[in-house]
Every structure is written in C-alpha cells, then in structure tokens.
Image: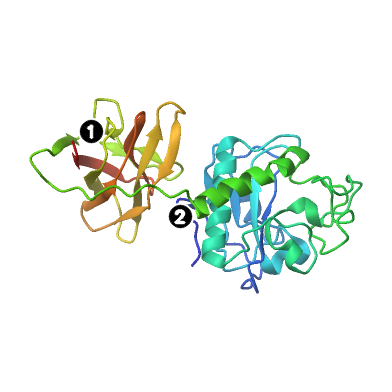
C-alpha cells in the first residue's frame, strides 16, 4: 500500500477497473473548479474520472487512490501519473497551505516512487513530461506560445492528451505560475540545508532540566496536525529558551486508539517571528491497543535559537484522545 503520511484516507470503492501504474513518471497538478471540502462522494461513482489526492485550501490532504494504482484524471497519461486535485476556482491561486502540501506530496512521490526531481515541460512520451507537471501541458487550446509558462499541449509541440476538453484552463493561469514555488519548496524538503551538529549532551552539574506534565484531555483530529498543550499554560511549547544542545522526551497516554490504528506525532520548531512552523522532525508513531495506548517520543542532540520554540504536533483517527502527557528536557547551560 502506498499512502501519504498524514492524509485522510478515504478510498474510492466504486468499480473502475484500476490497474497498477506501469511507471511513476510525473505528478500532475489540477484544480477542482469548486470549493468543496471533499471530492470523495463525487469521485466514488463508476464511470467518473478521479484523482489520487485532493488538497483543501487549508492544506488538508485527502487520499482516494493508492498510488500503486492508476487514477483517471489524466486520460492518455493515466498509466504513469500521480494526480492531485486542489480546492479552488479557475481564476484563483493556491494558498500558502496548499503550496506546502503540494510540495510535501511531490517530495514524497520522489522518495517513494522515484518520480523525477525536475520540472516537466510537455506531455510528450519522453523525459520532457517527467517530474512535477500540471494538467495544462496536455490540454489543447488557444493558449500563449512558449516561452510563456501558460502554453498548452499544442504550443509545447504536441504530446499525450490529458483531457478531451479544448481550452480547459486547469489548473488556472495563476496556479501554473506558482508551480516553480511548489518545486522550490519540494527541493528544500528533499535536500534541507545542513543543520550544525552540536556536541552531544552530557549530563553534568551544569545541566539544566525542565519537566512539565498535563492531564488535560485533548481530542485527536484526522484532518490537521494539532499542537500538544503541555507547558506554560495555554502554550504548546516544551522548550521556551534558546540553548546550545538538548535532549527531549515526551510520554503520551492515548485512549480510544483501536488495535491497528496509528497516532502520528512529531517534534517541530515554531518560529515566533514568522509565526509558523519552520522545521518538522521525523514522524514517530503510537500504535493502538486493546486498552489505553502508551508511547514515548524522543529527540536527541537537537538545537534551537532565539525566537524558536520546540513543540509536539500530532494527527490520527477521530475518536482517539490524549489522556495525559509529560515532557522532560535536558539542555546544556
């Protein structure tokens, strides 16, 4: 099974005669020309084209089709394409949250399926159509000529038809111009700037310790990463001052997590000046059990700086609840 971590998985069950993808040549970006929170009900009908993913304005991702198999959004390209529909009208732009999710999805496709790490240039049946692409490149119409990024199939020298419609603007002119932004962010995810390696934390008399705990129950959400309320009252922060190097551990007790279900959690760095998360550490998992589930998250030999806060974020199945949590952080003086 090939599923994007953190996506709401809503598989399409209607019979459509899917086949395994022959290759994973490209990720194609679309716009739904609508503002629904989900396309599942519309797609889950026989004879209706569908996509692998849908990204809401908020960045929330729904996955409808296992990416080992074909979806039907790209006509002659269905056998080698991962397709992503996005919430929005034709004349609009992708939100910042959508750009981030699209970049994460494309980076995941590169790592998981070997999609080429480059921008596609056409819908031709060669390497020029491989990488990060969009529906426009396979649509006939009276579009601008190259070198305009808004050129369509004819202007790009022909290739596969990715739609039977003529003049369809998908994903919209403004979004086509945003594709380099998606690609640039994906490269940051795939090849992050090196983080200076601090000296390992050694427990000495100079060590400082911070411990916090909470019994405040927090419902788990399936549609968004949620910050853990654990320290400093309403703050989500575990580490609230800059230190050269630190180790942190968070223990969680979770109720309502069924056997086979997974709660995903990760440490993250929040930039107070930019008011956004700038670093996400690797995802860690807590697996459901017959009773309450217990798990520990750890982050070792990490660093932070002025104005940066360490937080924990989690996502999982609706109905699960974090019953209690405790954090312990040891850092150099």
Horizontal side of residue 311 vs 89, given as left or right? left
Report which residue position mark 2 lands on.
Answer: 5
Residue at 61%, 64% in the rendered image:
115
Q: Which of disc 2 and disc 1 is earlier in sequence?
A: 2
What label sits on residue 216 in the rendered view? Answer: 1
Q: Residue furthest right?
A: 142
Q: Position of residue 171 (x, y in %)?
A: 73, 45
Residue at 79%, 54% in the rendered image:
137
SS at badge 1: loop
Tell me where residue 96 sits by quadrant: top right
Q: Position of residue 209 (x, y in %)?
A: 14, 37
Q: Residues within 10 Å of mark 1 (few under 14, many from 20)?
A: few
Q: Distance between the Cα atoms at labels 1 and 2?
A: 27 Å
- Check the image and report above or below for 68 versus 184: below
SS at badge 2: loop
Q: Residues within 10 Å of mark 2 (few under 14, many from 20)?
A: some
């Amino acid at each position: 099974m090939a599923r994007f971590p953190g996506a709401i998985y809503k598989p399409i069950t209607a019979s459509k005669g899917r086949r395994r993808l022959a290759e994973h040549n490209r990720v194609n970006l679309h716009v739904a020309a609508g503002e629904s929170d989900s396309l599942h009900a519309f797609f889950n009908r026989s004879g209706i084209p569908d996509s692998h993913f849908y990204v809401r304005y908020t960045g929330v991702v729904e996955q409808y089709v296992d990416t080992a198999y074909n979806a039907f959004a790209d006509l002659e390209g269905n056998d080698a394409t991962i397709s992503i529909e996005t919430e929005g009208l034709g004349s609009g732009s992708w939100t910042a949250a959508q750009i981030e999710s699209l970049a994460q999805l494309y980076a995941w496709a590169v790592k998981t399926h070997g999609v080429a790490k480059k921008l596609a240039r056409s819908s031709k049946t060669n390497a020029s159509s491989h990488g990060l692409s969009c529906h426009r490149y396979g649509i006939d119409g009276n579009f601008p000529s190259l070198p305009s990024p808004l050129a369509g199939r004819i202007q790009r020298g022909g290739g596969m038809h990715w739609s039977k419609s003529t003049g369809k603007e998908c994903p919209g002119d403004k979004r086509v111009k945003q594709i380099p932004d998606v690609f640039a962010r994906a490269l940051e995810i795939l090849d992050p700037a090196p983080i200076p390696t601090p000296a390992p934390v050694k427990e000495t008399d100079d060590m400082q310790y911070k411990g916090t705990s909470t019994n405040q129950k927090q419902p788990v959400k399936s549609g968004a990463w949620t910050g853990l309320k654990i320290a400093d009252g309403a703050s989500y922060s575990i580490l609230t001052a800059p230190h050269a190097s630190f180790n942190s551990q968070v223990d969680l007790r979770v109720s309502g997590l069924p056997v086979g279900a997974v709660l995903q959690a990760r440490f993250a760095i929040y930039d107070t000046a930019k008011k956004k998360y700038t670093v996400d550490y690797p995802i860690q998992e807590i697996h459901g059990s017959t009773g309450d589930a217990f798990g520990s998250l750890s982050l070792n030999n990490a660093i932070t700086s002025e104005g940066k806060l360490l937080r924990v974020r989690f996502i999982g199945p609706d109905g699960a609840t974090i019953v209690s949590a405790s954090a312990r952080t040891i850092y150099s003086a």
